[in-house]
Image: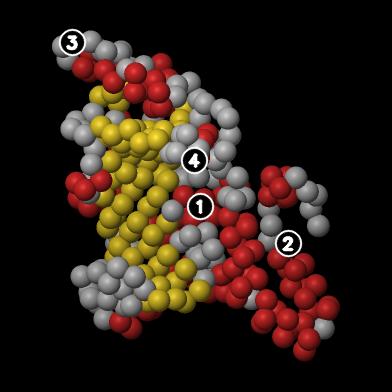
């Protein structure tokens, strides 16, 4: 289940810490996954992008290690993973001397559609030279790209989130993707107390069309509602808004844990399996039961 976020939040975060030598890289990766839920929830797998090994989590989080010291250990956290691990992110960010390689900042509005920006390009305040409109032939949803993906540093996407999730509503997501030195600079700024909203406004703005100094023009009401006040340095999706990852978790449990659980059940009996489940129930926040529409066990 996707959620509507009227407040700017970090929607993707990719971090790297320089660690020399495989033993130190493996120890760092192990410490990371221990901090992020424990080893039982992660699966050791093949690496990618020049890394030999990876740990993968059902939420989509990936830890890469086993490469040169320059590449270090890499942590990739898409939106679902940020939501799932939101309670632990302060410890993760404080625990290592990270450099960011990607930061996505997103905010939603139901006041304007993508067509509004296509029909009124003068309201867009951006240094991007390339503006590209793409239409999904299946859903009919539109995405307006500001900037070029090839430049690799900054790309703004304005897209029809409603069509993406199959809902017939006005739901527009405005998303800024920062990479390379732009991501590193934004991460350092955020860690030093700069507001997430300030980073977003420096990347994209929407103001009344006109001539002269653009910053003397009034900011559009919908955008003022999104960015009019500052917010915390790091704001992630709420952990309780991760219900769509439950299906991924269930598939992972079925694929990798069904056989071990069955063996334990045969050897230790039904009571052992029930005790494991009851210990799990005790760790679930009562709000999660409410979000799932069921009573607590």
Q: Which residue lies furthest to the left in this view?
A: 212
Asked if residue 165 is positioned above or below residue 49 in the image, the reply reads: above
- Label 3, on which residue? 211
Q: Are marks 4 and 1 in contact (CB under 8 Å)?
A: no
Which residue reaches farthest front? 137
N-terminal of the pair, mark 3 or mark 1, is: 1
Determine crowd level at label 2: few under 14, some 14-19, many 20+ residues with C-alpha closer than 10 A.
few
Q: Mark 4 points at which residue?
A: 138
Q: Residue at x 73, y 84 (%)?
A: 264
Q: Dot 3: few (<14), some (14–19), or many (≥20) neighbours within 10 Å?
A: few
Circles 2 and 3: CB distance less than 8 Å?
no
Q: Residues within 10 Å of mark 4 (few under 14, many from 20)?
A: few
Front-most of residues 188 and 209: 209
Image quadrant holding the N terminus, namely: top right
Along the line of sight, the residue nearer the viewer: 144 or 6: 144
- Asked whether, in this view, residue 25 is left or right of residue 87, the answer is left
Could you tell me if residue 168 is visible in this image? yes
């Amino acid at each position: 289940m996707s959620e509507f976020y009227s407040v700017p939040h970090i929607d993707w975060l990719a971090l790297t810490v320089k660690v020399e030598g495989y033993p130190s890289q493996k120890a760092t990766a192990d410490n990371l996954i221990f901090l992020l839920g424990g080893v039982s929830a992660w699966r050791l797998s093949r690496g990618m992008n020049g890394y030999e090994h990876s740990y993968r989590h059902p939420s989509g989080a990936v830890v890469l290690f086993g490469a040169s010291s320059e590449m270090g250990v890499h942590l990739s956290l898409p939106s679902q993973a940020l939501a799932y691990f939101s309670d632990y992110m302060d410890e993760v960010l404080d625990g290592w001397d990270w450099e960011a390689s990607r930061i996505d900042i997103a905010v939603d509005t139901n006041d304007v559609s993508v067509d509004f920006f296509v029909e009124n390009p003068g309201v867009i305040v951006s240094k991007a030279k390339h503006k590209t409109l793409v239409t999904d032939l299946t859903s009919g949803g539109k995405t307006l790209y500001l900037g070029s993906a090839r430049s690799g540093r900054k790309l703004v996407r304005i897209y029809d989130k409603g069509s993406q999730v199959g809902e017939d509503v006005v739901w527009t997501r405005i998303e800024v993707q920062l990479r390379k030195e732009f991501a590193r600079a934004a991460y350092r700024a955020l860690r030093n107390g700069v507001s997430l909203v300030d980073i977003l406004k420096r990347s994209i703005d929407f103001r009344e069309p006109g001539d002269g100094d653009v910053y003397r023009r009034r900011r559009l009401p919908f955008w003022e509602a999104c960015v009019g006040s500052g917010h915390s340095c790091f704001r992630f999706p709420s952990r309780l808004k991760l219900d769509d990852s439950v299906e991924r978790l269930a598939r992972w449990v079925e694929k990798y844990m069904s056989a071990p659980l069955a063996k334990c059940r045969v050897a230790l009996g039904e009571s052992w399996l029930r005790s494991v489940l009851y210990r799990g129930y005790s760790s679930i926040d009562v709000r999660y039961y409410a979000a799932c529409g069921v009573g607590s066990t």
